[in-house]
Amino acid sequence: MLTTGPRGTKDILPDISYSWRYIENIIHELCQQAAYQEIRTPIFEHTELFLRGIGETTDIVEKEMYTFTDLGQRSLTLRPENTAAVVRSYLENKLYATLNPAKLYYIGPMFRYDRPQAGRYRQFHQFGVEAIGAKDPSIDAEIISLAIQFFQRLGLNDLTLQINSVGCPVCRPIYREKLQAFFKDKLPSLCKDCQSRYERNPMRLLDCKNEKCQELSQGAPHIIDCLCEECNDHFEKLQGFFKAANIDFIINKRLVRGLDYYTKTAFEIEYKPLGAQSAVCGGGRYDGLIEQCGGQATPAIGFAIGLERTFLALEKQNLLPPKDDSIKIFIAPIGEKAKEVAFRLVYELRSAHISAETDYLDRSIKAQMKSANRYQAEYVAIIGEDELLNNQVMLKNMKTSEQELVSIDDLKNKLVDKAGEKKND
Ligand code: HAM
């Protein structure tokens, strides 16, 4: 137990953490360029927020939440997603007073008691974006295009954008009735989950993974054919924006999302080679959520991208950048007194923003040269007995093997000069 992490969790080890930084840098740059601002909300929230926000009949709320009672007898939940929490924060901090639309993004861990498998974890990370306050389909197009641009910047291709409209409180009840009528005599043959979905959340009948249920749902009516005029117009205009910018998409009439807050636009981006867990991004419009959480009726749309799945896709396409943790200089002291000088030098060089490392294990000079190579050090400064007496180091260029004696007091300036020479090369 003590040497194994909880099921469905993963350590991000040094050999991969640099890739996370690479992806995070792309996210920050992209969002800054598109005028989105970062928001960081707590990892746990009042359970009530998710019950109301995500929907009590969803799989997430029914089966997947990490809920606990704290010492003050409050029911809290590790966030299974972050849209509800961003909405809570938007209302609590009155962001609507200064940001309209509020264009927000986040990166962080989410928690779902899912059945772990490749691409599906109990703690996973999302990059998510929410635009709150605009109802025009142009913002739907912008949000979706941002997700596409994120994958483009990573160099990923073979992605498919699928869109659908899930209607609104005007057209959905009519569709609901049609759907229930379609499934009525099939009800006894549906799986247990679907039997309970029939009353509580019939649109989810289309999303069941059970083969028999999938078979029985063939020929079911599609919401897209039952949209009210406003939803239809919104969906048409969204497609117009995609066509104008040459963004490829597929209309997937069966696309329904696993969270209850969606209205109008719903979308997913798929990377098929990932197999069963191929959805790398999911999102949509949630025009009713802000009011449901106690605010004024406010339209909104967003998405979340699964970063572990993005990593799997990058690995498949061999697109992870090479690791670069090279340092400028390795200080190699020989003997006790030299160690003090080495410590001082490392301290001063790092203060001057020059990357420097030394030996802490009293290694022989040969072993220290090996360490320097492992660090891909550009230079090694050897401090032996003679050097110490003369207040010097033997500075070795690891590429050319050239060596020169340099005064300890000049070392910092020398490295700065050399950096300048290199630039002028
Ligand atoms: P979601 O579809 O539940 O949407 O999750 C978005 C993405 O998170 C998925 O497409 C997938 O890549 C990743 N993901 C979900 N569950 C797991 C898991 N157990 N392990 C690994 N990755 C996972 C939402 O979360 C919505 N909040 C998106 C949104 C934002 N809608 C509007 N704004």
Image: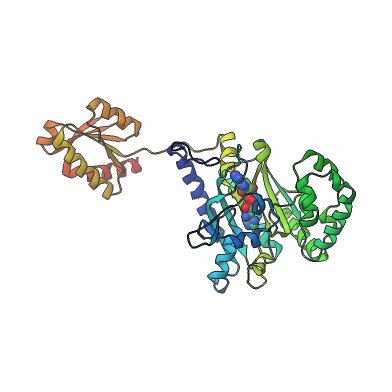
Horizontal and vertical percent position of residue 290: 64, 67
Measuring 28% from the left and 35% from the top, which residue is drawn there? 379
Residue furthest to the left: 389
Q: Which colour assignment does the render follow?
A: rainbow
* 360 with respect to 290 (left or right): left
Horizontal and vertical percent position of residue 223: 82, 55
Q: Could you say which quadrant of the image residue 384 lies in?
A: top left
Measuring 49% from the left and 38% from the top, which residue is drawn there? 321
Name the quarter where the C terminus is drawn: top left
Residue furthest to the top: 366
Horizontal and vertical percent position of residue 26: 52, 49
* 288 with respect to 391 (left or right): right
Measuring 84% from the left and 58% from the top, which residue is drawn there? 175
Q: Nearer the viewer, residue 262 or 374?
A: 262
Q: How many marks?
A: 0
Q: Nearer the viewer, residue 240 or 359?
A: 359
Q: Nearer the viewer, residue 198 or 124?
A: 198
Q: Is residue 131 above or below residue 184?
A: below
* 66 with respect to 164 (left or right): left
Q: Nearer the viewer, residue 88 or 304?
A: 88
Q: Could you say which quadrant of the image residue 84 lies in?
A: bottom right
Q: Is residue 230 above or below residue 410?
A: below
Horizontal and vertical percent position of residue 230: 79, 66
* 15 with respect to 418 (left or right): right
Is residue 327 at all visible to an observer of this figure? Answer: yes
Is residue 317 at all visible to an observer of this figure? Answer: no
